[in-house]
Image (cartoon, rainbow, N blue to C red):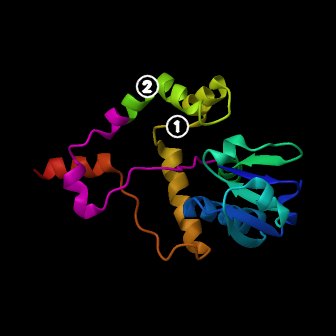
């Protein structure tokens, strides 16, 4: 996920086109501007097309495959995870497997770590599939999948998640902050009660 602009000072950005693909990413963008830059640009939701997004806006939020494939000529491209880390010194979690409390027992038998590991063991097959769809060199794709993405949530990531939700609430982007509970600790509690 990247912020794209022609401007050098983000505090001068007056309008941002937000990729319609992710409300979480849009909220992160708003938090960075409101909390850390102290400005509130006009927000516009848009399909992920950098040229069209920047036609009438100072900046654009692009996520997913489109964020890796647009022409970057004369554009300033800022990685959102790096911006978050710059302002908070914490990690950012872009994707999780989530389950409602009432369904916890149904997913208790699923080995999510094994599913993750199986995917990581098949990096070469994944690269072969996506190099036909994403116009990046195989080495760039490998770098992205093996070094740019973290597949484990450590304490700074957990703290980053909590701060994200706290700031989203502070700025009216969510109605309430629910406590974060991680499946491994919930399963241990369930097993100890048995």
- Work out how far the residue at label 2 is from the one at label 1, CA to CA, in angstroms: 16 Å
- Of 42 and 172, the residue lying toward us: 42
Whether residue 40 appears in this view of the structure is: no
**Where is mark 1, residue-wise?**
150
Q: Residue at x 47, y 37 (%)?
A: 151
The quarter of the displayed image where residue 112 is located: top left
- Of 175 and 170, the residue lying toward us: 175
Horizontal and vertical percent position of residue 11: 84, 64
Whether residue 193 appears in this view of the structure is: yes
Q: Residue at x 61, y 33 (%)?
A: 144
Q: Is residue 86 left or right of residue 148?
A: right
Q: Residue at x 36, y 51 (%)?
A: 182
Helix, strand or loop at label 1? It is: loop
Q: Residue furthest left?
A: 194
Horizontal and vertical percent position of residue 6: 88, 54
**Where is mark 2, residue-wise?**
122
Part of the protein shown in magenta: 89-115
Q: Give the mark, 2 or 1, whose residue is nearer the N terminus.
A: 2
The image's mark for residue 14 is none
Horizontal and vertical percent position of residue 158: 48, 50
Instruction: Indicate yes or no whether the magenta region holds residue 105.
Output: yes
């Amino acid at each position: 996920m990247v912020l794209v602009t022609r401007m050098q000072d983000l505090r001068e950005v007056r309008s941002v086109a937000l990729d319609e693909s992710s409300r979480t990413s849009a909220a992160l963008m708003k938090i960075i501007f409101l909390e850390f830059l102290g400005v509130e640009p006009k927000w516009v939701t848009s399909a992920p097309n950098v040229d069209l997004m920047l036609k009438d806006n100072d900046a654009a939020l692009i996520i997913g495959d489109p964020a890796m494939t647009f022409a970057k000529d004369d554009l300033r491209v800022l990685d959102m995870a790096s911006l978050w880390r710059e302002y908070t010194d914490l990690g950012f979690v872009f994707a999780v497997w989530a389950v409602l409390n009432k369904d916890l027992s149904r997913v208790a038998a699923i080995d999510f770590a094994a599913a993750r590991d199986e995917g990581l063991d098949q990096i070469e097959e994944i690269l072969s599939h996506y190099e036909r769809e994403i116009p990046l060199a195989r080495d760039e794709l490998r770098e992205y999948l093996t070094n740019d993405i973290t597949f484990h949530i450590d304490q700074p990531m957990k703290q980053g998640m909590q701060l994200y939700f706290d700031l989203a609430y502070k700025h009216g982007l969510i109605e309430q902050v629910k406590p974060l509970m991680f499946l491994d600790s919930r399963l241990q509690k369930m097993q100890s009660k048995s």
